[in-house]
Amino acid sequence: MSYGFAFATFSSIVVHTFLWFRKDIARQFKRTLKDEQDIHSHLMRNYTEVSWWWYLGTGVISVVFILTSVVIVPSQLPVWALALALFLAAIFVLPLAILVAISNQNISLNIMSQLIVGYILPGRPIAAMLFKTFTFTTGFQSITFLMDLKTGHYMKVPPRVMFMAQLIGAIIGTFLVIGIEEWLFSTIEDMCSLKQKNGFICPGSHTFFAASIIWGGVGPAKLFSPGRPYSPLLWFFLVGAVLPIPFYFLAKRFPLGIWRYINIPIFFAMIQVIPLASGMNLGSWILTGFIFNYLVRRYRFNWWHKYNYILSAALDTGVAFMLLALFFFLQLPKGGVYLDWWGNNVWANTADGMGMPLKPVLEGTKIGPSSW
C-alpha cells in the first residue's frame, strides 16, 4: 500500500500543480527581481545578483564529474540513462518546491526513480542505485538550495555570498562525510552489522541495498506489470491524477470553504509513510501538531503567530545538539553508558522490535508466486 500511495503522490503532484499554479508559474517565468514590489525584493536590489554563468559553470563541472564516475567505473548505467535521471529531477523540482514552500513537506523522488529505472534497465542493481541517487539527490539538493536562498533573501544576505557559502559548504561536507564514514568503519566493531552492540546497524544502508535488489535485480516488471502480484497498485496513478480535480473545482465554487485547505499530494505523501512508521513515530508527530497547531493556535494565537516557527527550528536544533551530547557524554567514554529505563526499552517489546511478523512463513513455504 505504501508503494501505491507513492504512485498516487506523483500523479497528483502533476495535476495539482497544473490546476492551482499554472498561471503563477507562467507569470514568474516572465518576471525578474526588479518586477517584484515587496519590501524584501526592493531591499535586495542593493546587492549584485548571481550571474547565470555561475550556475552554468557549476552545472557543467558537476556533470563532468558525474560522467567520469559512471563511464570510467563499471557502473552499469549508460549515459542516456544518466541524462534521463537528471531530466526527471529537473522537471520535478518546481512542483516539489512549491509543495515544500506551502506545507514544509519534502516529497522524495525515490519510488518514482526506482520504478522507472527498473523498467528501462532491468537486472542492473548497481545502475538502479545510481539512477535513484542522481535523481533523488539532484532534486533534494536543488530544493534545499532554494530554501537557503529564500532564507538569505529574507535575512538580506547578499546573493553571491549565499551562493558561495552553499557551494563551499557542499564541497567541504562531501569530504567530511566520507572521512567520518571511514573513521566509523575503522574504529567501531561490527559496524552496520545487526549484531552491533551500540545500535550502529545502518538501517538506511540496508534499506538502500534491499531496494536495489527489489527494483534493480528482480525488477518492477515482475511485480507490477499486468498479471503480476501487485499490478492493481498501478491504478493508484489514475486515482492520484483524478482526485485533485473535484477538490479544485469545489474550492473555486466555495472559495471560503474548507475545500481550499485540502491538498491531495500532501495527503498521499504523508499516508504512504504510515505503514513504515511505528506508533511512537506517529504519536509524537500527531501530539506535537495537535498541541501547537490546534490548541495553542486556537487559544493563544498571538503566541503561536510570534513563536511557532521559532519553536519548530528550536525543536530540530535541540534534537541535533542532544545527539552530540548523548554521543560524547554517554556513548564515547569508557565503552559507553546505557540508561536502562522505559523510554529506551519500550520499542524492544513491540512486534517490530522483536522481529515478529503478522503472518510467519512456515517451513517449506515461501512468499510470492511459485515461479517468476
Image (cartoon, rainbow, N blue to C red):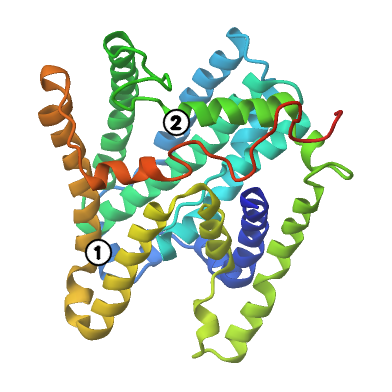
Which residue is most to the right? 227
- Location of residue 117 in the rendering, given as x and y in whole percent from the top left corner: 70, 32
Q: Residue shown at 47%/34% (left/top)?
A: 56
Q: Horizontal placement of 18 versus 205: left or right?
A: right
Q: Residue shown at 77%/33% (left/top)?
A: 119
Question: Helix or strand or loop: what does disc 2 sit on?
Answer: helix
Residue 46 visible here: no
Question: Relative to residue 303, is residue 270 depicted above or below?
Answer: above
Q: Residue shown at 28%/31% (left/top)?
A: 169
For mark 1, what is the residue?
309
In contact (CB < 8 Å): disc 2 and disc 1: no
Task: Name the residue type under label 2.
Answer: Pro
- Point out which mark residue 31 bears: none
Task: Name the residue type under label 1.
Answer: Tyr
Question: Relative to residue 127, is residue 160 depicted above or below?
Answer: below
Quarter of image, res 203 = top left
Q: Nearer the N terminus, badge 2 or badge 1? A: 2
Which residue is most to the front? 363
Residue 217 visible here: yes
- Point out which mark residue 203 bears: 2
Q: Residues within 10 Å of mark 2 (few under 14, many from 20)?
A: few
- Location of residue 205 in the rendering, given as x and y in whole percent from the top left corner: 47, 26
Q: 172 or 305, which is in the foreground?
A: 305
Question: Relative to residue 222, is residue 241 depicted above or below?
Answer: below
Q: Residue shown at 10%/30% (left/top)?
A: 329
Q: 43 or 225, which is in the foreground?
A: 225
Q: Horizontal placement of 175 versus 369: left or right?
A: left
Q: Horizontal placement of 364 versus 282: left or right?
A: right
Q: 112 or 345, which is in the foreground?
A: 345
- Location of residue 195 in the rendering, given as x and y in whole percent from the top left corner: 39, 20
